[in-house]
Image (cartoon, grey):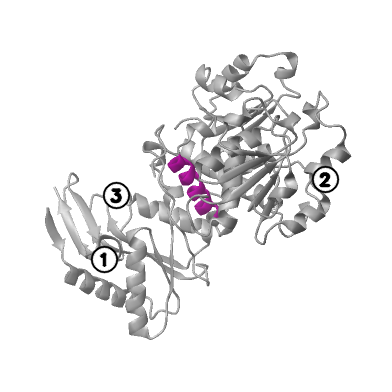
Amino acid sequence: MSVALPAADIARALTRISHEILERNSGSDSLTLLGIPTRGAHLAKRISAIIESIEGKPVQTGTLDITLHRDDLRLRPPRAIMPTSIPALGIEGRNVVLIDDVLYSGRTIRAALDALGEVGRPKTVQLAVLVDRGHRELPIRADFVGKNLPTSSNQSVSVKLTELDGSDEVVIDS
Amino acid sequence: MKHLLSINDLSKVDAISILDTAEKLARVSDGPMKKLPTLRGRTIVNLFAEDSTRTRISFEAAAKRLSADVINFSAKGSSVSKGESLKDTAQTLQAMGADAVIVRHSASGAAQRLADLEWMSGSVINAGDGTHEHPSQALLDAFTIRKHLAKGADDLTGLRVAIVGDVLHSRVARSNVLLLTKLGAHVTLVSPPTLLPVGVSSWPVDIAYDFDSLLESVDVVMMLRIQLERMSDLFFPNAREYSRYFGLTKDRLQKLKPGAIVMHPGPMNRGLEITADAADSARSVIVEQVTNGVSVRMAILYLLLAGSAGEIAL
């Protein structure tokens, strides 16, 4: 087990991602942040707080559960369904930023795009992740990446967050 | 878990996970996503060898919201009315590739038999078998009670429920007794002695013959339908006498404690076991039971069919 990203690096990465999101979208007025439960939802809250402190006004933030849109439901026992909350202004015509902890096969994001399609038609959909560990199985890439972690597919990457695990760190188990 | 045949198949944890899943699915259906792709490509057969309105429609709506293909099969107008046996019917459904069969039958144990004899490989969901059980109804009743009265708790500990009426013929009552007591509620059956089943003294419930004595202490009044189609004997002298002693009238409604709710599994005999005043009052959650039924049945279908043939793992 090795620590790939200590707490201070996670904080810096989230601050940088927040600035990059604002730069790309010329401010926060058109933005809607949607975190993918469980850890993506907590990261979305943190990014939302950072953007609010930069811009001085709150940004539309919610969660998008993708469980019911997964393509691997048949392969394992049923999963618990997590809450979805779409912010008041909806996603129609907005610049939506999906936020997740780890980008791996890309299947979660494919499911998220399907789930978004059920809700409405955003102007753009962008993707922010804390860790990109490679090994994509679908043509999907992230717009904002905290850290690229080259891994082998038999390693596992776990993101720990204070809200759930008591401390912030990203560790690689092999 | 592959089948849902009886509340006895569920542990308390399983039951709570079904209710929790239903709560989340209810929020999804209230939200912008009306239709979910979760069961796309699965075939679900509604095999109804006995009449039903809301259970069949509710399962159909639940399956369709999860994008499953639904085939409705009722005894009238099918080969069942020509005398085809349950076995041949089941094998026909198997040959068509049904992933699940939702079965309603007038014979107690019909669903169990379908599941045990492996005439077909899919899941079997009991939607009411004779006077035995109706598990999805009990789950939606527990869901409705929990939503109104549990004050954020997982289970129903400390709540007092009166189940009033024809317990003898009621599969709803049997499933509810099993489930509500499993979830910690205290259940009292209120019925004329002629409408209580043999052996009821061994059930984990109290028995009362005087409805009025309970009105001020219960949190939930669940009225059962007088099943006119099963009334081959004289169980009570006449309908007026039954209503006078066991009907939920306006007077009885007013004696209920604040916050108490009135339930009925439907279809109601207005004026017999429940008056229109009671059925349409602000305490009545009867229409809401129907709405909740769809969410609870979505949860059942999701947990039984969405994953690999594994157990409920939450």
The subunit carrying tag 1 is A
Q: Gap between marks 3 and 1, in whole Å?
A: 26 Å
Q: Amino acid at mark 1?
A: Thr
Q: Position of residue B160 (x, y in %)?
A: 60, 49
- Badge 1 crowding class, 10 Å Cα cut-off, few under 14, some 14 to 19, many 20 or more, is few
Q: So how many labels did they put on this image?
A: 3
Please identify, in this view, whether the residue under mark 2 or under mark 1 is nearer the observer: 2
Q: Nearer the viewer, residue A2 or A92?
A: A2
Q: Gap between marks 3 and 2, in whole Å?
A: 58 Å
Q: Which residue is mark 3?
A: A105
If you read the primary sequence from the N terminus, does the residue marked by circle 3 or circle 1 appear first? 3
Image mark for residue A162: 1
- Badge 2 crowding class, 10 Å Cα cut-off, few under 14, some 14 to 19, many 20 or more, is some
Q: Position of residue A105 (x, y in %)?
A: 29, 49
Q: Is residue B90 left or right of residue B254?
A: left
User: In this view of the protein, can residue A56 be seen by the observer?
Assistant: yes
Q: Is residue B232 left or right of residue A127?
A: right
Answer whether residue B13 is magenta in the image.
Answer: yes
Residue interval drawn in magenta: B12-26
- Badge 3 crowding class, 10 Å Cα cut-off, few under 14, some 14 to 19, many 20 or more, is some
